Amino acid sequence: MNVSVDMKKPQHSTPTSEYDVVVVGAGPYGLSTAAHLQGRGLKVAIFGKPLKLWREHMPKGMLLRSYWWATNLSDPEKKYGLEQYFQAEGQHESDPFLIETFIDYGLWFQKHAVPHVDETYVKTIERKEGQFLVTLVDGRVVRAPAVVMAPGLNYYVYRPAEYDHMPDELVSHTGDHPSFDRFAGKHVVVIGGG
């Protein structure tokens, strides 16, 4: 995704949709933000694949460090918290809290609180005449006076340059491995403390 401010570019010939706010990212923060903005009566567009980082880049069977009661997504009427999810799905609260339960809850929250997520990715964001022009990878353009960036942690992965010369088979980031099975029986060095 590219972000540019006040760039001089040719006029877009693609029809533009108007929104009060565009939210980029459909993880926990993006979904919660969109729910609150919609709760204020704003016309909101939200782009991204719901909980993609959690579904595709976290180890299966992982236990969350937070307690279940501290792991809620947020909506303005407090109708879609974890307690309501457990009641609706006939489940019981438990600690430690499994990532699969959190993912299921997050998708349930999205379905009920922010049902109109557009899974198209954002290509560019430009500032023009007091508005943001958000161009999607499919060529559509949307306009809004405000953009909320909630792209998730995958955009901020740190890979030390000292290891760039090493092959991918030897150096990787934990986010590259939804399963650690490939490391069974091997000696592994973990660098970092996050």
Image (cartoon, rainbow, N blue to C red):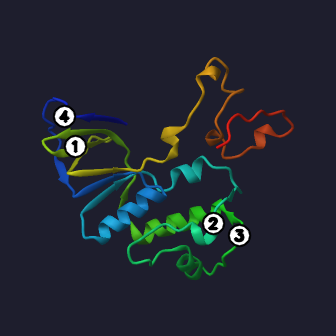
- Confirm or deny contact between disc 3 and disc 2 (CB under 8 A): no
Q: Name the residue under label 4.
A: 6
Label whose residue precedes the other's in the sequence (1 or 4): 4
Measured as percent of width and height from the top left, residue 147 is found at 29, 50
Q: Name the residue under label 2.
A: 101
Instruction: State the separation of the CA atoms marked 4 and 2.
Output: 43 Å
Asked which secondary structure carries label 1, the reply is strand
Q: In this view of the protein, which residue sits in the foreground, 105 or 153?
A: 153
Instruction: State the separation of the CA atoms marked 3 and 4.
Output: 49 Å
Label whose residue precedes the other's in the sequence (4 or 2): 4
**Residue 121 in sight from this viewpoint:** yes
> Three-letter amino acid code at disc 3?
Asp
Residue 166 relative to residue 148: left or right: right
- Confirm or deny contact between disc 3 and disc 4 (CB under 8 A): no
Q: Which residue is drawn at 65% across and 67% down?
A: 67
Instruction: State the separation of the CA atoms marked 1 and 2.
Output: 37 Å
Instruction: State the separation of the CA atoms marked 1 and 3.
Output: 44 Å
